[in-house]
Structures are given as structure tokens and as C-alpha cells.
Amino acid sequence: DPHGEGLVDGAKVEDTATDPNDADSDDDGLDDGEELDEYGTDPNDADTDDGGVGDGDEVEAGTDPLDPDDDYPVDDTGGDTGIDAPMDSWYQGGGGCGCASGSPAAGFGAFLLGALMLFRRRRS
């Protein structure tokens, strides 16, 4: 194991189809041995769960690299966007900016009230 990733090169090629000359074949920040032995992730796929966040970033963030539902958006520099809620809960707010609060029902009610006011204005 000349690369220190925990895999013997012959077994690395035959069993995992990973690059014997690269300790991190998929460049996700986790060594191939860590992916196989510690996390159960695919050393040839930088985002094993296809949730949109790389395996190494998920391990660093404390999320499960095998669960796509806990992936949080990461900006293009690899940092946290500051959004505290999963992407499918965008309407619940919690993004830290104070710009997305309330519920879909409250937003729809405000829309209906605005439409009613506009309709009355046009009739008069």
C-alpha cells in the first residue's frame, strides 16, 4: 500500500476498479480505503448518493453520504450557503436571511388578497 489509503494495489484494481496510482480515485476528499472501510461509499463516484453534495463534503458536514435527502446546497467555492433547511423545505424559511418566512398557505392568502384588491380597483 504505497499510497497509505488502506488498499493493497492488486486488490485495489481487481476488487474495486479504482486507480492504483491515486489514493482518492474519485477526488471527493476521501481516500479509497476510507470510502470502502469506514463510510461504505463508492470510491469511483464522488457523490455516492447522487444528492448533489460530494461524499467528502458530506462527511465533513456530518451528513450521511449514503442518504440523498440530507444533502444541503454548497456554493461553487465548496462552502456552506448558510441555508439551514433541506432544499425541499424552501418555503419554511430558516435561511438566515429573514427573507423566506411563513408558509405556502400564508403566501397564497396574500396573493389572493392582492388579486382581489386589484380586481376591485379595476371595477371602480
Image: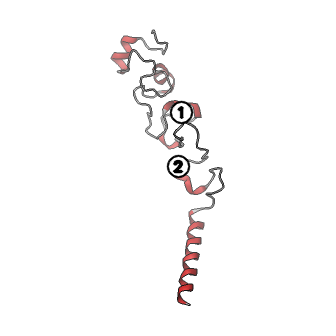
Left or right: residue 109 compared with residue 46: right
Residue at left offset 53%, top offset 86%: 122
Relative to 100, does residue 46 appear above or below in the rendering? above
State how the image is colored.
secondary structure
User: Quick one: SS at disc 2?
Assistant: helix
Q: Where is residue 55 in the image (x, y as percent from the top left)?
A: 49, 32
Q: Where is residue 121 in the image (x, y as percent from the top left)?
A: 57, 85
Q: Quadrant of the N terminus?
A: top left
Q: Earlier in the sequence, mark 2 or mark 1?
A: 1
Mark 2: amino acid? Met
Callout 2: few (<14), some (14-19), or many (20+) C-alpha neighbours within 10 Å?
few
Callout 1: few (<14), some (14-19), or many (20+) C-alpha neighbours within 10 Å?
many
The residue at the far front in this view is 77
Residue at left offset 56%, top offset 63%: 104
The residue at the far top in this view is 2
The residue carrying mark 2 is 87
User: Quick one: SS at disc 1?
Assistant: helix
Left or right: residue 66 compared with residue 109: left
Relative to 63, does residue 34 appear above or below in the rendering? above
Q: Report the label total.
A: 2
Relative to 49, does residue 42 appear above or below in the rendering? above
Mark 1: amino acid? Asp
Give the quarter of the image for residue 25: top left
Q: Position of residue 43 (x, y in %)?
A: 42, 25
The residue at the far bottom in this view is 124
**CB-based contact (under 8 Å), mark 2 and mark 1:** no
The residue carrying mark 1 is 57
Relative to 46, does residue 71 appear above or below in the rendering? below
The residue at the far left in this view is 14
Residue at left offset 47%, top offset 12%: 3
Q: Position of residue 105 (x, y in %)?
A: 57, 66
Q: How far apart are marks 2 and 1 (CA)?
A: 16 Å
